[in-house]
C-alpha cells in the first residue's frame, strides 16, 4: 500500500529567479563589452534566458533521482509550488548534472544559428547559473504515509451477525477468500 505513496518536494521559486537574474546581468555585462545592436541584444538575451527558465520550471534536484532512496520505484513526484501540489513524472525532473547538460546542449544548438549568439554564448558558463530548486519534504511525505497507514483496513469486508461465511465441508481457496 505504501507503494502508492507519492513523495513531496518543495519548489523554491526564488532559486531559479535569482539565477535567471544573475544570468541576465551577465548577458548585459557581455553586451556592454561587445558592440551589439541594443534591440537585437534583447532578442538574444530572451532566447538564452528562455532555455534556463524552461529547465527551472521543470525542477532541479541536487542529485540524480537514483540517489534518493525514497524515490526508488516511483514514477512521479508531488511538487508543491505556491501551496499547490502537482504530480510530475520522475523523468521530467533534472538533477544538477542533467540540467547543466540540457542547458549546454541547447546553448550549443542556439549558437549555431547566429554569429552574434555564438559570441555571447561562448562567454557564458551555464554551470554558474544552475542551482537546485527542489527539496524533499520529509515531513509532508511522512504525514501522507501516516494517513495511508491509518486508513489501512485490517479486515477485507463486513459480515453481518448470523451470516454464513463458509459451509461445513467447503474447500477454502483464494477465490473463496475474496
Image (cartoon, rainbow, N blue to C red):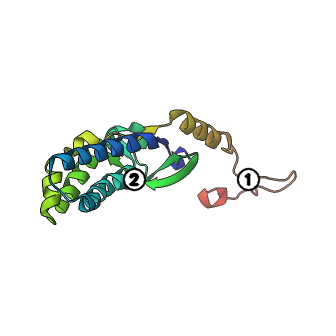
Q: Nearer the viewer, mark 2 or mark 1?
A: 2
Residue at horizontal 24 percent and vertical 62 percent from the top: 40
Residue 62 coordinates in the image, percent (x, y): 34, 38
Q: Is residue 65 visible?
A: no
**Quarter of the figure with the C terminus:** bottom right
- Which residue appears at 46% of the width and 54% of the height? 88
Q: Position of residue 79 (x, y in %)?
A: 49, 47
The answer to which image quadrant residue 16 occupies is top left
Relative depth, front residue between 82 and 112 = 112
Which residue was labeled with disc 2?
58
At 26% from the left edge and 47% from the top edge, which residue is drawn?
Answer: 28
Considering every residue shown, the one lying at the far right of the view is 162
Image quadrant assignment for residue 95 = top left
Q: Mark 1 — residue?
A: 157
Q: Nearer the viewer, residue 70 or 24?
A: 24
Query: Label 2 vs label 1: CA separation?
Result: 43 Å
Instruction: Tell me which residue sits at (61%, 57%) in the image.
Output: 173
Q: Position of residue 89 (x, y in %)?
A: 42, 55
Sequence-earlier tag: 2 or 1 = 2
Relative to the observer, which residue lies in front, 90 or 51?
51
As drawn, is 43 to the left or to the right of 150? left
- Look at the picture and state if 78 lies above or below 114: above
Q: How far across and down, in percent of the image, does residue 144 sit?
A: 59, 41
| Residue 10 visible in image | yes
Q: Secondary structure at mark 1?
A: loop
Q: Tell me the crowding category of disc 2: few under 14, some 14 to 19, or many 20 or more residues within 10 angstroms, Cα based.
A: some
Question: Closest to the observer: 162 or 94?
Answer: 94
Q: Are marks 2 and 1 in contact (CB under 8 Å)?
A: no
Q: Quadrant of residue 21?
A: top left
Amino acid at each position: 500500500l505504501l507503494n502508492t505513496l507519492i513523495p513531496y518536494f518543495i519548489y523554491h521559486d526564488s532559486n531559479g529567479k535569482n539565477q535567471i537574474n544573475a544570468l541576465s546581468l551577465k548577458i548585459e555585462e557581455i553586451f556592454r563589452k561587445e558592440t551589439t545592436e541594443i534591440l537585437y541584444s534583447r532578442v538574444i538575451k530572451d532566447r538564452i534566458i528562455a532555455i534556463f527558465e524552461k529547465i527551472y520550471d521543470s525542477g532541479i534536484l541536487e542529485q540524480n533521482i537514483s540517489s534518493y532512496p525514497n524515490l526508488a520505484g516511483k514514477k512521479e513526484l508531488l511538487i508543491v509550488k505556491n501551496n499547490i501540489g502537482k504530480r510530475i513524472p520522475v523523468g521530467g525532473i533534472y538533477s544538477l548534472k542533467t540540467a547543466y547538460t540540457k542547458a549546454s546542449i541547447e546553448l550549443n544548438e542556439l549558437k549555431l544559428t547566429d554569429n552574434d549568439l555564438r559570441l555571447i554564448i561562448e562567454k557564458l558558463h551555464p554551470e554558474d547559473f544552475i542551482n537546485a530548486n527542489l527539496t524533499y519534504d520529509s515531513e509532508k511525505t511522512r504525514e501522507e504515509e501516516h494517513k495511508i497507514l491509518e486508513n489501512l483496513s485490517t479486515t477485507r469486508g463486513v459480515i453481518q451477525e448470523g451470516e454464513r461465511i463458509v459451509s461445513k465441508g467447503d474447500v477454502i481457496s483464494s477465490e473463496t477468500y475474496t
